[in-house]
Image: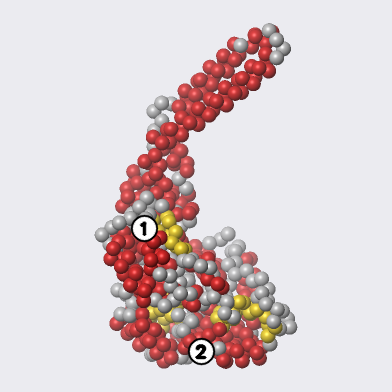
Amino acid sequence: MRDPMQTMATCFEQVALFFPSGDPKLQESFERRAAYLDSRDYSREVLADTLKEYHRYLGANAETLQMIEELRHKETLTVITGQQAGILTGPLYTLYKAMTTIRLAKEQREKLGRPVVPVFWIAGEDHDWLEIRETYLLNSEGKPIPCHLPGDGGGESVGHQKVPSWETIEAQLLEIPDSEFRSSVLKKCRELTEQAENLTEWFALILQWLVHKWGLIFFDPLLPEFKRLAAPMYEQILKMHPDVREALAERTKKWVELGFTPQIQPMGGEVNLFLSVPERRAILWNDQAFYLRGQKESWDLDALNDLLDQAPERFSPNVVTRPVVQEFLFPTLAYVPGPGELNYWAQLGGVFSTFGFDMPILFPRLSAVVLTASWQKLLHKQALTVEDVYRGLEEHRRLCVRERDDQEIDERFQLFSEQIEKGYADLKPLEEIHVNVSEWLIRNEVKVKFQLDYLKRKVWQAQRKRCSDLLRSLQQLEDGITPHQSRQERVLNPFSFVIRYGPSFVDRVAEIPIEDFSEHQILL
Protein backbone atom coordinates (compact mmCIF):
# COMPACT_ATOMS: atom_id res chain seq x y z
CA MET A 1 0.00 0.00 0.00
CA ARG A 2 1.34 3.44 -0.92
CA ASP A 3 1.41 6.13 1.75
CA PRO A 4 -0.75 9.11 0.68
CA MET A 5 0.85 11.48 3.18
CA GLN A 6 4.39 10.61 2.09
CA THR A 7 3.42 10.95 -1.57
CA MET A 8 1.74 14.31 -0.96
CA ALA A 9 4.84 15.57 0.87
CA THR A 10 7.43 14.40 -1.66
CA CYS A 11 5.67 13.99 -5.05
CA PHE A 12 2.54 16.13 -4.91
CA GLU A 13 2.20 16.18 -8.70
CA GLN A 14 1.40 12.44 -8.60
CA VAL A 15 -1.73 13.06 -6.51
CA ALA A 16 -2.62 16.60 -7.64
CA LEU A 17 -5.86 15.35 -9.27
CA PHE A 18 -7.15 14.19 -5.89
CA PHE A 19 -6.28 17.39 -4.01
CA PRO A 20 -7.43 20.06 -6.52
CA SER A 21 -6.90 23.08 -4.25
CA GLY A 22 -3.19 22.57 -4.49
CA ASP A 23 -0.01 21.63 -2.68
CA PRO A 24 -0.28 22.56 1.03
CA LYS A 25 3.44 23.36 1.09
CA LEU A 26 2.94 26.28 -1.35
CA GLN A 27 1.55 29.62 -0.18
CA GLU A 28 0.08 30.27 -3.63
CA SER A 29 -2.35 27.38 -2.96
CA PHE A 30 -3.75 29.28 0.02
CA GLU A 31 -3.96 32.50 -1.97
CA ARG A 32 -5.93 30.81 -4.76
CA ARG A 33 -8.22 29.13 -2.27
CA ALA A 34 -8.88 32.43 -0.48
CA ALA A 35 -9.84 34.09 -3.77
CA TYR A 36 -12.25 31.23 -4.53
CA LEU A 37 -13.90 31.53 -1.11
CA ASP A 38 -14.40 35.27 -1.63
CA SER A 39 -16.85 34.38 -4.44
CA ARG A 40 -19.02 32.34 -2.04
CA ASP A 41 -21.71 33.38 0.43
CA TYR A 42 -22.29 31.93 3.90
CA SER A 43 -24.87 32.35 6.68
CA ARG A 44 -22.29 34.12 8.79
CA GLU A 45 -24.62 35.91 11.20
CA VAL A 46 -26.52 32.80 12.26
CA LEU A 47 -23.26 30.86 12.44
CA ALA A 48 -21.63 33.49 14.65
CA ASP A 49 -24.68 34.01 16.87
CA THR A 50 -25.03 30.29 17.56
CA LEU A 51 -21.31 29.77 18.12
CA LYS A 52 -21.17 32.75 20.48
CA GLU A 53 -24.02 31.46 22.64
CA TYR A 54 -22.51 27.97 22.71
CA HIS A 55 -19.06 29.23 23.68
CA ARG A 56 -20.39 31.48 26.41
CA TYR A 57 -21.91 28.33 27.88
CA LEU A 58 -18.53 26.58 27.52
CA GLY A 59 -16.82 29.49 29.28
CA ALA A 60 -14.58 30.29 26.31
CA ASN A 61 -11.90 32.96 26.67
CA ALA A 62 -12.08 36.43 25.17
CA GLU A 63 -9.77 35.51 22.29
CA THR A 64 -12.10 32.72 21.13
CA LEU A 65 -15.16 34.97 21.41
CA GLN A 66 -13.35 37.61 19.36
CA MET A 67 -12.57 35.05 16.64
CA ILE A 68 -16.26 34.13 16.54
CA GLU A 69 -17.10 37.80 16.04
CA GLU A 70 -14.64 37.90 13.16
CA LEU A 71 -16.65 35.16 11.42
CA ARG A 72 -19.37 37.74 10.76
CA HIS A 73 -17.08 39.52 8.30
CA LYS A 74 -16.84 38.38 4.68
CA GLU A 75 -13.04 38.43 4.65
CA THR A 76 -12.74 35.90 7.53
CA LEU A 77 -11.71 32.35 6.61
CA THR A 78 -11.45 29.16 8.65
CA VAL A 79 -9.01 26.31 9.12
CA ILE A 80 -10.95 23.25 10.30
CA THR A 81 -10.22 19.86 11.78
CA GLY A 82 -12.46 17.30 13.43
CA GLN A 83 -12.56 14.20 15.57
CA GLN A 84 -14.89 11.96 17.57
CA ALA A 85 -15.65 13.03 21.14
CA GLY A 86 -13.25 10.69 22.95
CA ILE A 87 -12.74 10.28 26.70
CA LEU A 88 -10.56 13.11 28.03
CA THR A 89 -10.07 14.12 24.35
CA GLY A 90 -9.19 10.56 23.25
CA PRO A 91 -5.73 9.77 21.81
CA LEU A 92 -2.81 12.18 21.56
CA TYR A 93 -3.41 12.85 17.89
CA THR A 94 -6.57 14.78 18.80
CA LEU A 95 -4.40 17.34 20.55
CA TYR A 96 -1.98 17.31 17.61
CA LYS A 97 -4.88 17.99 15.22
CA ALA A 98 -6.10 20.89 17.33
CA MET A 99 -2.65 22.43 17.63
CA THR A 100 -1.91 22.05 13.90
CA THR A 101 -5.20 23.83 13.16
CA ILE A 102 -4.45 26.65 15.60
CA ARG A 103 -0.93 27.12 14.27
CA LEU A 104 -1.94 27.00 10.59
CA ALA A 105 -4.76 29.52 11.12
CA LYS A 106 -2.36 31.90 12.86
CA GLU A 107 0.26 31.46 10.13
CA GLN A 108 -2.23 32.12 7.32
CA ARG A 109 -3.70 35.10 9.16
CA GLU A 110 -0.24 36.68 8.98
CA LYS A 111 0.57 35.63 5.41
CA LEU A 112 -2.81 36.47 3.87
CA GLY A 113 -3.26 39.65 5.91
CA ARG A 114 -6.86 38.80 6.83
CA PRO A 115 -8.67 37.00 9.68
CA VAL A 116 -8.28 33.21 9.66
CA VAL A 117 -9.77 31.35 12.64
CA PRO A 118 -9.32 27.72 13.82
CA VAL A 119 -12.41 25.51 14.13
CA PHE A 120 -12.73 22.05 15.66
CA TRP A 121 -15.69 20.07 14.31
CA ILE A 122 -16.69 17.61 17.06
CA ALA A 123 -18.15 14.51 15.41
CA GLY A 124 -21.01 14.35 17.90
CA GLU A 125 -23.35 12.91 15.26
CA ASP A 126 -21.20 9.77 15.03
CA HIS A 127 -22.67 6.64 16.63
CA ASP A 128 -19.57 4.43 16.45
CA TRP A 129 -19.32 3.66 20.17
CA LEU A 130 -16.25 1.45 19.73
CA GLU A 131 -14.32 4.44 18.39
CA ILE A 132 -14.68 6.42 21.61
CA ARG A 133 -15.57 4.03 24.43
CA GLU A 134 -12.04 3.69 25.80
CA THR A 135 -8.74 5.46 26.07
CA TYR A 136 -5.36 4.47 27.53
CA LEU A 137 -3.11 6.11 30.09
CA LEU A 138 0.25 4.93 31.44
CA ASN A 139 0.20 3.57 34.99
CA SER A 140 2.99 3.82 37.57
CA GLU A 141 4.69 0.77 36.01
CA GLY A 142 4.64 2.33 32.56
CA LYS A 143 1.92 0.04 31.19
CA PRO A 144 -1.06 1.39 29.22
CA ILE A 145 -4.27 0.85 31.18
CA PRO A 146 -7.76 1.41 29.80
CA CYS A 147 -10.35 3.93 30.90
CA HIS A 148 -13.83 2.89 29.70
CA LEU A 149 -17.20 4.51 29.23
CA PRO A 150 -20.01 2.37 30.65
CA GLY A 151 -22.77 1.01 28.40
CA ASP A 152 -22.91 0.35 24.66
CA GLY A 153 -24.23 3.63 23.26
CA GLY A 154 -27.51 2.09 22.09
CA GLY A 155 -26.84 3.08 18.47
CA GLU A 156 -27.56 6.76 19.18
CA SER A 157 -25.26 9.64 18.27
CA VAL A 158 -22.44 10.29 20.71
CA GLY A 159 -23.69 13.82 21.30
CA HIS A 160 -26.89 12.43 22.82
CA GLN A 161 -25.00 10.30 25.36
CA LYS A 162 -24.84 11.39 28.98
CA VAL A 163 -21.52 12.02 30.69
CA PRO A 164 -20.58 9.34 33.23
CA SER A 165 -20.07 10.35 36.83
CA TRP A 166 -16.58 11.58 37.62
CA GLU A 167 -16.30 8.81 40.21
CA THR A 168 -16.72 6.26 37.40
CA ILE A 169 -13.80 7.81 35.52
CA GLU A 170 -11.58 8.53 38.53
CA ALA A 171 -11.90 4.95 39.78
CA GLN A 172 -10.13 3.84 36.59
CA LEU A 173 -7.27 6.30 37.10
CA LEU A 174 -6.04 5.05 40.49
CA GLU A 175 -2.92 3.51 38.96
CA ILE A 176 -1.82 6.75 37.33
CA PRO A 177 1.52 7.78 38.92
CA ASP A 178 1.58 10.63 41.39
CA SER A 179 3.13 13.96 40.48
CA GLU A 180 3.04 17.57 41.60
CA PHE A 181 0.31 18.20 39.00
CA ARG A 182 -1.88 15.14 39.49
CA SER A 183 -4.20 16.58 42.13
CA SER A 184 -4.83 19.91 40.38
CA VAL A 185 -5.27 18.32 36.93
CA LEU A 186 -7.77 15.73 38.18
CA LYS A 187 -9.62 18.42 40.15
CA LYS A 188 -10.03 20.46 36.95
CA CYS A 189 -11.16 17.38 35.03
CA ARG A 190 -13.76 16.74 37.72
CA GLU A 191 -15.10 20.31 37.44
CA LEU A 192 -15.40 20.06 33.65
CA THR A 193 -16.99 16.60 33.82
CA GLU A 194 -19.66 17.81 36.23
CA GLN A 195 -20.34 20.86 34.03
CA ALA A 196 -20.94 18.86 30.82
CA GLU A 197 -24.42 17.70 29.81
CA ASN A 198 -23.31 15.23 27.13
CA LEU A 199 -20.16 13.62 25.71
CA THR A 200 -19.72 16.31 23.05
CA GLU A 201 -19.73 19.09 25.66
CA TRP A 202 -17.38 17.08 27.86
CA PHE A 203 -14.93 16.70 25.00
CA ALA A 204 -15.16 20.40 24.12
CA LEU A 205 -14.64 21.54 27.72
CA ILE A 206 -11.58 19.33 28.27
CA LEU A 207 -9.89 20.23 24.97
CA GLN A 208 -10.77 23.90 25.39
CA TRP A 209 -9.01 23.89 28.77
CA LEU A 210 -5.89 22.28 27.26
CA VAL A 211 -5.59 24.87 24.45
CA HIS A 212 -7.04 27.91 26.25
CA LYS A 213 -3.87 29.97 25.69
CA TRP A 214 -4.44 30.00 21.94
CA GLY A 215 -8.20 29.97 21.43
CA LEU A 216 -10.14 27.42 19.40
CA ILE A 217 -13.72 27.52 18.11
CA PHE A 218 -15.72 24.32 18.67
CA PHE A 219 -18.52 23.27 16.35
CA ASP A 220 -21.22 20.90 17.59
CA PRO A 221 -23.24 19.81 14.52
CA LEU A 222 -26.09 18.57 16.71
CA LEU A 223 -27.12 22.07 17.84
CA PRO A 224 -30.60 22.77 16.36
CA GLU A 225 -29.55 26.06 14.72
CA PHE A 226 -26.75 24.30 12.86
CA LYS A 227 -29.11 21.53 11.76
CA ARG A 228 -31.44 24.12 10.26
CA LEU A 229 -28.50 25.76 8.51
CA ALA A 230 -27.43 22.41 7.04
CA ALA A 231 -30.95 21.35 5.96
CA PRO A 232 -30.67 22.69 2.37
CA MET A 233 -27.52 20.61 1.95
CA TYR A 234 -29.29 17.48 3.26
CA GLU A 235 -32.04 18.10 0.70
CA GLN A 236 -29.45 18.24 -2.09
CA ILE A 237 -27.80 15.03 -0.86
CA LEU A 238 -31.16 13.20 -0.96
CA LYS A 239 -31.85 14.49 -4.46
CA MET A 240 -28.42 13.83 -5.94
CA HIS A 241 -27.47 10.53 -4.28
CA PRO A 242 -27.02 8.63 -7.60
CA ASP A 243 -24.61 11.30 -8.87
CA VAL A 244 -22.70 11.22 -5.59
CA ARG A 245 -22.26 7.44 -5.77
CA GLU A 246 -21.06 7.68 -9.36
CA ALA A 247 -18.60 10.49 -8.55
CA LEU A 248 -17.23 8.57 -5.57
CA ALA A 249 -16.81 5.38 -7.61
CA GLU A 250 -15.04 7.20 -10.45
CA ARG A 251 -12.52 8.98 -8.21
CA THR A 252 -11.98 5.83 -6.10
CA LYS A 253 -11.18 3.82 -9.23
CA LYS A 254 -8.45 6.29 -10.19
CA TRP A 255 -7.09 6.29 -6.63
CA VAL A 256 -6.77 2.51 -6.68
CA GLU A 257 -5.12 2.60 -10.10
CA LEU A 258 -2.35 4.72 -8.55
CA GLY A 259 -1.66 1.97 -6.00
CA PHE A 260 -3.51 3.34 -2.98
CA THR A 261 -5.95 1.41 -0.83
CA PRO A 262 -9.29 3.27 -0.55
CA GLN A 263 -10.51 4.14 2.92
CA ILE A 264 -14.19 4.31 1.92
CA GLN A 265 -15.60 0.96 0.80
CA PRO A 266 -19.27 1.42 -0.28
CA MET A 267 -21.52 -1.60 0.27
CA GLY A 268 -24.14 -0.48 -2.28
CA GLY A 269 -27.22 1.74 -2.25
CA GLU A 270 -25.77 4.41 0.03
CA VAL A 271 -27.57 7.75 0.07
CA ASN A 272 -24.81 9.01 2.40
CA LEU A 273 -27.19 10.32 5.02
CA PHE A 274 -28.34 8.94 8.36
CA LEU A 275 -31.74 9.22 10.00
CA SER A 276 -32.21 8.94 13.77
CA VAL A 277 -35.19 6.76 14.82
CA PRO A 278 -33.80 7.29 17.61
CA GLU A 279 -30.87 5.00 16.86
CA ARG A 280 -28.87 6.33 13.93
CA ARG A 281 -29.53 4.31 10.73
CA ALA A 282 -28.16 4.73 7.22
CA ILE A 283 -30.62 5.79 4.50
CA LEU A 284 -30.32 3.45 1.48
CA TRP A 285 -31.78 3.26 -2.03
CA ASN A 286 -32.85 0.03 -3.79
CA ASP A 287 -33.65 1.43 -7.27
CA GLN A 288 -37.29 1.88 -6.30
CA ALA A 289 -37.49 3.57 -2.91
CA PHE A 290 -35.55 4.75 0.10
CA TYR A 291 -35.33 2.62 3.23
CA LEU A 292 -33.35 2.47 6.48
CA ARG A 293 -30.69 -0.15 7.02
CA GLY A 294 -32.19 -3.00 9.02
CA GLN A 295 -35.80 -1.94 8.36
CA LYS A 296 -38.33 -2.97 5.68
CA GLU A 297 -40.45 0.19 5.60
CA SER A 298 -39.92 2.22 2.41
CA TRP A 299 -39.88 5.98 1.98
CA ASP A 300 -40.28 8.19 -1.06
CA LEU A 301 -38.37 11.42 -1.63
CA ASP A 302 -41.33 13.63 -0.76
CA ALA A 303 -41.79 11.89 2.61
CA LEU A 304 -38.12 12.33 3.49
CA ASN A 305 -38.19 15.98 2.44
CA ASP A 306 -41.31 16.59 4.54
CA LEU A 307 -39.55 15.06 7.53
CA LEU A 308 -36.48 17.16 6.79
CA ASP A 309 -38.61 20.32 6.85
CA GLN A 310 -40.20 19.33 10.16
CA ALA A 311 -37.21 17.79 11.97
CA PRO A 312 -33.80 18.51 10.37
CA GLU A 313 -32.17 17.46 13.66
CA ARG A 314 -32.97 13.82 12.81
CA PHE A 315 -30.72 13.88 9.73
CA SER A 316 -26.93 13.70 9.67
CA PRO A 317 -24.24 13.16 7.03
CA ASN A 318 -21.90 10.18 6.75
CA VAL A 319 -18.17 10.12 6.01
CA VAL A 320 -18.77 10.97 2.32
CA THR A 321 -21.05 13.96 2.82
CA ARG A 322 -19.86 15.47 6.11
CA PRO A 323 -17.01 17.29 4.29
CA VAL A 324 -19.42 18.87 1.79
CA VAL A 325 -21.77 19.95 4.60
CA GLN A 326 -18.72 21.57 6.21
CA GLU A 327 -17.93 23.28 2.89
CA PHE A 328 -21.52 24.56 2.73
CA LEU A 329 -21.39 26.01 6.26
CA PHE A 330 -17.85 27.39 6.55
CA PRO A 331 -15.44 29.37 4.34
CA THR A 332 -12.89 26.58 4.70
CA LEU A 333 -9.40 27.61 3.67
CA ALA A 334 -7.90 24.27 4.71
CA TYR A 335 -8.84 21.07 6.50
CA VAL A 336 -6.37 19.31 8.82
CA PRO A 337 -6.69 15.51 8.47
CA GLY A 338 -4.87 12.54 9.91
CA PRO A 339 -3.39 9.84 7.61
CA GLY A 340 -6.63 7.83 7.37
CA GLU A 341 -8.72 10.91 6.66
CA LEU A 342 -6.29 12.08 4.00
CA ASN A 343 -6.87 8.76 2.27
CA TYR A 344 -10.65 9.08 2.15
CA TRP A 345 -10.62 12.79 1.29
CA ALA A 346 -8.67 11.77 -1.83
CA GLN A 347 -11.80 9.89 -2.92
CA LEU A 348 -14.10 12.92 -2.54
CA GLY A 349 -13.01 15.41 -5.19
CA GLY A 350 -15.76 14.34 -7.57
CA VAL A 351 -18.34 14.47 -4.77
CA PHE A 352 -17.45 18.12 -4.09
CA SER A 353 -17.75 18.90 -7.81
CA THR A 354 -21.18 17.24 -7.93
CA PHE A 355 -22.46 19.90 -5.52
CA GLY A 356 -20.63 22.73 -7.27
CA PHE A 357 -17.88 23.04 -4.64
CA ASP A 358 -14.09 22.95 -4.75
CA MET A 359 -12.41 20.79 -2.12
CA PRO A 360 -10.39 22.75 0.50
CA ILE A 361 -6.63 22.47 0.89
CA LEU A 362 -5.67 19.35 2.83
CA PHE A 363 -2.93 20.16 5.35
CA PRO A 364 -1.96 16.97 7.28
CA ARG A 365 -1.75 17.18 11.05
CA LEU A 366 1.60 17.02 12.78
CA SER A 367 2.74 13.59 13.91
CA ALA A 368 4.89 13.23 17.01
CA VAL A 369 6.22 10.89 19.68
CA VAL A 370 6.77 12.04 23.26
CA LEU A 371 9.97 10.83 24.94
CA THR A 372 10.22 11.08 28.72
CA ALA A 373 13.63 11.64 30.31
CA SER A 374 13.88 8.00 31.37
CA TRP A 375 13.06 6.77 27.86
CA GLN A 376 15.65 9.13 26.37
CA LYS A 377 18.28 7.86 28.82
CA LEU A 378 17.52 4.22 28.04
CA LEU A 379 17.59 4.81 24.28
CA HIS A 380 21.00 6.46 24.62
CA LYS A 381 22.39 3.80 26.95
CA GLN A 382 21.23 0.95 24.70
CA ALA A 383 22.29 2.75 21.50
CA LEU A 384 18.70 2.54 20.21
CA THR A 385 16.63 4.92 18.09
CA VAL A 386 12.89 5.51 18.03
CA GLU A 387 12.85 3.70 14.67
CA ASP A 388 14.40 0.66 16.38
CA VAL A 389 11.52 0.65 18.85
CA TYR A 390 9.01 0.92 15.99
CA ARG A 391 10.56 -2.20 14.43
CA GLY A 392 10.29 -4.08 17.74
CA LEU A 393 12.85 -4.88 20.43
CA GLU A 394 12.53 -8.67 20.64
CA GLU A 395 15.88 -9.29 18.96
CA HIS A 396 17.51 -6.57 21.08
CA ARG A 397 16.20 -8.27 24.23
CA ARG A 398 17.65 -11.59 23.12
CA LEU A 399 21.05 -10.01 22.44
CA CYS A 400 21.01 -8.19 25.80
CA VAL A 401 20.38 -11.43 27.68
CA ARG A 402 23.12 -13.23 25.75
CA GLU A 403 25.62 -10.42 26.21
CA ARG A 404 25.17 -10.76 29.97
CA ASP A 405 25.83 -14.50 29.87
CA ASP A 406 29.13 -14.83 31.76
CA GLN A 407 28.88 -18.62 32.08
CA GLU A 408 28.87 -19.58 28.39
CA ILE A 409 25.54 -21.40 28.80
CA ASP A 410 25.16 -22.64 25.23
CA GLU A 411 28.79 -23.79 25.02
CA ARG A 412 28.54 -25.77 28.26
CA PHE A 413 25.32 -27.48 27.18
CA GLN A 414 26.76 -28.18 23.74
CA LEU A 415 29.80 -29.81 25.32
CA PHE A 416 27.62 -31.82 27.68
CA SER A 417 25.42 -32.94 24.76
CA GLU A 418 28.47 -34.13 22.85
CA GLN A 419 29.65 -36.05 25.94
CA ILE A 420 26.25 -37.74 26.19
CA GLU A 421 26.35 -38.71 22.53
CA LYS A 422 29.86 -40.14 23.06
CA GLY A 423 28.71 -42.01 26.17
CA TYR A 424 25.86 -43.68 24.31
CA ALA A 425 28.22 -44.51 21.46
CA ASP A 426 30.45 -46.22 24.03
CA LEU A 427 27.45 -48.30 25.16
CA LYS A 428 26.70 -49.55 21.63
CA PRO A 429 28.62 -52.90 22.11
CA LEU A 430 26.01 -53.84 24.74
CA GLU A 431 23.56 -54.47 21.89
CA GLU A 432 25.10 -57.94 21.59
CA ILE A 433 23.61 -58.90 24.94
CA HIS A 434 19.99 -58.80 23.75
CA VAL A 435 18.07 -57.83 20.64
CA ASN A 436 16.12 -55.14 22.56
CA VAL A 437 19.17 -53.30 23.94
CA SER A 438 19.48 -51.15 20.82
CA GLU A 439 15.90 -49.89 21.18
CA TRP A 440 16.42 -49.27 24.94
CA LEU A 441 19.51 -47.20 24.27
CA ILE A 442 17.72 -45.08 21.63
CA ARG A 443 14.72 -44.46 23.88
CA ASN A 444 16.88 -43.63 26.85
CA GLU A 445 19.04 -41.22 24.87
CA VAL A 446 15.93 -39.42 23.62
CA LYS A 447 14.69 -39.03 27.22
CA VAL A 448 18.05 -37.77 28.44
CA LYS A 449 18.27 -35.21 25.61
CA PHE A 450 14.69 -34.11 26.33
CA GLN A 451 15.64 -33.51 29.98
CA LEU A 452 18.78 -31.72 28.91
CA ASP A 453 16.78 -29.40 26.64
CA TYR A 454 14.38 -28.76 29.51
CA LEU A 455 17.29 -27.95 31.81
CA LYS A 456 18.76 -25.60 29.21
CA ARG A 457 15.47 -23.72 28.89
CA LYS A 458 15.23 -23.36 32.67
CA VAL A 459 18.81 -22.05 32.88
CA TRP A 460 18.09 -19.46 30.16
CA GLN A 461 14.88 -18.54 32.00
CA ALA A 462 16.97 -17.93 35.12
CA GLN A 463 19.41 -15.90 33.03
CA ARG A 464 16.56 -13.70 31.80
CA LYS A 465 15.52 -13.16 35.43
CA ARG A 466 19.05 -11.94 36.12
CA CYS A 467 18.38 -9.32 33.42
CA SER A 468 14.85 -8.56 34.61
CA ASP A 469 15.49 -4.88 35.41
CA LEU A 470 16.79 -4.20 31.91
CA LEU A 471 14.06 -6.27 30.25
CA ARG A 472 11.43 -4.46 32.29
CA SER A 473 12.84 -1.10 31.18
CA LEU A 474 12.81 -2.18 27.54
CA GLN A 475 9.19 -3.31 27.90
CA GLN A 476 8.28 0.06 29.41
CA LEU A 477 10.01 1.71 26.46
CA GLU A 478 7.86 -0.26 24.02
CA ASP A 479 4.70 0.30 26.08
CA GLY A 480 5.36 4.04 26.05
CA ILE A 481 6.49 4.54 22.44
CA THR A 482 4.57 1.73 20.69
CA PRO A 483 1.71 0.78 23.03
CA HIS A 484 -0.24 -2.21 21.76
CA GLN A 485 2.25 -2.42 18.85
CA SER A 486 0.86 0.85 17.49
CA ARG A 487 2.00 4.46 17.31
CA GLN A 488 1.93 6.29 20.63
CA GLU A 489 -0.25 9.07 19.23
CA ARG A 490 -2.96 6.59 18.25
CA VAL A 491 -3.26 4.90 21.67
CA LEU A 492 -2.11 7.02 24.60
CA ASN A 493 -4.23 9.81 26.03
CA PRO A 494 -2.54 13.23 26.42
CA PHE A 495 -3.33 13.13 30.13
CA SER A 496 -0.60 10.48 30.47
CA PHE A 497 1.73 13.46 30.06
CA VAL A 498 -0.44 16.37 31.29
CA ILE A 499 -0.67 14.70 34.70
CA ARG A 500 3.10 14.10 34.68
CA TYR A 501 4.27 17.49 33.39
CA GLY A 502 1.27 19.75 33.95
CA PRO A 503 -0.53 21.90 31.35
CA SER A 504 2.87 23.14 30.15
CA PHE A 505 3.05 19.85 28.24
CA VAL A 506 0.65 21.46 25.77
CA ASP A 507 3.06 24.40 25.45
CA ARG A 508 5.70 21.95 24.27
CA VAL A 509 3.30 20.47 21.72
CA ALA A 510 2.68 24.02 20.46
CA GLU A 511 6.41 24.36 19.72
CA ILE A 512 6.56 21.37 17.36
CA PRO A 513 7.03 22.45 13.71
CA ILE A 514 3.95 21.76 11.59
CA GLU A 515 5.49 22.41 8.18
CA ASP A 516 7.20 19.07 7.53
CA PHE A 517 4.21 16.78 7.92
CA SER A 518 6.00 13.85 6.26
CA GLU A 519 8.29 13.54 9.30
CA HIS A 520 7.41 12.00 12.67
CA GLN A 521 8.51 14.69 15.14
CA ILE A 522 10.15 13.87 18.47
CA LEU A 523 9.05 15.79 21.56
CA LEU A 524 11.68 15.56 24.31
How packed mark 2 is, by other alpha carbons closer than 10 Å (few <14, some 14-19, many 20 or more), is some
Q: Secondary structure at mark 2?
A: helix
Residue 174, disc: 1
Q: Is residue 369 left or right of residue 419?
A: left
Instruction: Give the quadrant of residue 522.
Output: bottom left
Determine whether, in the image, residue 357 is placed left or right of residue 119.
right
Q: Does dot 1 land on a helix, a strand or a loop?
A: loop
Whether residue 234 can be seen here:
yes
Residue 246 location, x and y as percent?
66, 78
Residue plotted at (39% across, 84% down): 54
Quarter occupied by the N terminus: bottom right
Q: Which mark is residue 228?
A: 2
What amino acid does circle 1 point to?
Answer: Leu
Location of residue 232 (image quadrant): bottom right
Location of residue 170 (image quadrant): bottom left
Q: Residue at x 45, y 45 (%)?
A: 393
- Is 512 situated above or below 485? below
Visual colour scheme: secondary structure
Q: What is the quadrant of the C terminus in the image?
A: bottom left
Could you tell me the amino acid type at mark 2? Arg
Up the image or down, 73 lies above or below 514; here it is below
Q: Report the side of 178 relative to 307 (left or right).
A: left
In 3D space, how far apart are the residues under numbered discs 1 and 2 (Cα atoms)?
44 Å
Query: Going from the N terminus, do you reach mark 1 or mark 2 first?
Result: 1
